[in-house]
Image: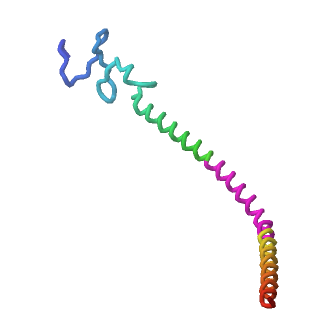
């Protein structure tokens, strides 16, 4: 090649602000330190990956907390279920007391009616 570089021909210029490097994918600026991450990777996908990992971590933490709450609720449910037979006995006892009170009131009502009839 001559002193002039063709537009399509790969060139390497050293010591220039606009230096370029020839790579298998074509020309890339040597001054991409702000545009590339570790190993020359574009930082945007890296940031997206970090954001996805952060979201995954948050979802995992939420799942753990939800499982813990579900376990607590299940334990409470089991405790309440264990109290049902005792509460059923209590209800039966109270129903018996109510029935007894009603019988007593009917008896007293009949006695009052009988007295009124005699008068």
Residue 32 highlighted magenta (yes or no): no
Please tell me which residue is depicted at 18% across the width and 12% down the height of the picture: 3
Relative to 38, is 70 on the left or the right?
A: right
- The x, y position of residue 12, in whole percent, is 29, 16
Please tell me which residue is depicted at 61% across the width and 49% down the height of the picture: 66
The magenta-colored residue range is 66-89
Q: What is the chief secondary structure element of the magenta stretch?
A: helix
Q: How is the image coloured?
A: rainbow
- The x, y position of residue 21, in whole percent, is 32, 20
- The x, y position of residue 62, in whole percent, is 58, 44
Q: Residue furthest front?
A: 119
Q: Say which quarter of the image contains residue 104.
A: bottom right
- The x, y position of residue 53, in whole percent, is 51, 37
Q: Nearer the viewer, residue 75 or 90?
A: 90
Q: Nearer the viewer, residue 84 or 38?
A: 84
Q: Height in image: 76 above or below 16?
A: below
Q: Nearer the viewer, residue 80 or 119?
A: 119
Relative to 48, is 81 on the left or the right?
A: right
Please tell me which residue is depicted at 18% across the width and 20% down the height of the picture: 6
Q: Height in image: 84 above or below 114?
A: above
Q: Quadrant of the N terminus?
A: top left
């Amino acid at each position: 090649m001559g002193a002039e570089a063709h537009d399509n021909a790969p060139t390497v210029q050293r010591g220039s602000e606009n230096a370029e490097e020839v790579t298998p994918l074509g020309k890339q600026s040597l001054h991409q330190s702000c545009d590339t991450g570790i190993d020359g990777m574009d930082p945007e996908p890296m940031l997206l990956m970090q954001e996805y990992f952060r979201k995954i971590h948050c979802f995992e933490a939420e799942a753990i907390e939800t499982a813990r709450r579900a376990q607590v609720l299940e334990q409470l449910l089991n405790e309440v279920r264990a109290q049902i037979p005792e509460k059923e006995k209590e209800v039966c006892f109270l129903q018996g007391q109510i029935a007894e009170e009603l019988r007593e009131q009917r008896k007293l009502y009949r006695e009052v009616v009988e007295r009124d009839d005699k008068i």
